[in-house]
Amino acid sequence: MSTASTTPIAFLQSLKVTAAKKTVSNNPQVHRRMKLARKLWEQIQLAKSQADGTQFTMTRFRSVTDPDGSRRSVEIPRRVRPWWWTTEANKLALNIRYGARKLEISKGKSAVEIATAAELVPTLELIKQAVEAGELDAQIEAAAVKLREGFVK
């Protein structure tokens, strides 16, 4: 009997225990940066699936009410729209979007020109790394301010 009571303590002693606390509020700048990084991940997956000739769909949960009145969650597909298009010069152009707003990468320029479709995924991954490193924080903040202004009456 005494061996059964000491066994859980032996397991707990093998763990590294710390006094870490979860932060109550995240830095809004980091939150916006990660939001854009998630959307860039979706674009990377969409570009990869188009290159492979497969269909990429994201799913989300929606709460529905059954005829008997009970509510349940169902998984429904969500469309992911590409941020790139083909230009008249037969090259690809890519906008980086934050919500419904296009990010202005440099003064007066919001699109990235890509020579071939093979360069699309590496370009998106490079942009994602730049976002995670904080290189586009000023542009994200400007787009977030414009988005918030649209909700004020």
Image: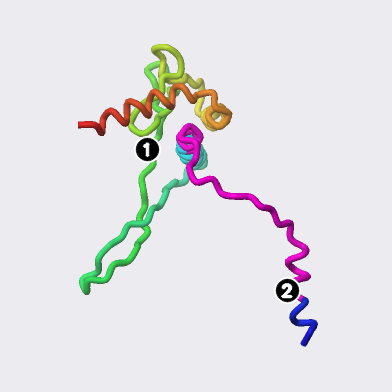
User: Residue at 52% across / 39% down in the picture?
Assistant: 48
Under circle 1, the secondary element is: loop
Of the two numbered discs 1 and 2 on the same chain, state the one appearing first in sequence: 2
State whether residue 110 appears in this view.
yes
Please report contact status of discs 1 and 2: CB closer than 8 Å, yes or no: no
Left or right of 149: which side holds 126? right
Quadrant (top left, top right, bottom left, bottom right) of the N terminus:
bottom right
User: Residue at 25% across / 33% down in the picture?
Assistant: 151
Q: Nearer the viewer, mark 1 or mark 2?
A: 2
Mark 2 residue type: Pro
The residues bearing labels 1 and 2 have C-alpha atoms spaced at a distance of 51 Å
In the current view of this chain or complex, which residue is farthest to the front? 19
State whether residue 50 appears in this view.
no
- Look at mark 2 in the image and give the residue it sits on: 8
Quadrant (top left, top right, bottom left, bottom right) of the C terminus:
top left
Residue 21: in magenta span: yes
Label 1 neighbour load within 10 Å: few <14, some 14-19, many 20+: few
Label 2 neighbour load within 10 Å: few <14, some 14-19, many 20+: few
Is residue 13 placed above or below 34 in the rendered structure? below
Q: Quadrant of residue 67?
A: bottom left
Mark 1 residue type: Arg
Image location of residue 134, percent across then percent down: 54, 27
Q: Which residues are magenta?
A: 7-34
Residue 43: give its label: none
Under circle 2, the secondary element is: helix
Residue 64: in magenta span: no
Left or right of 81: which side holds 126? right
- Look at mark 1 in the image and give the residue it sits on: 81
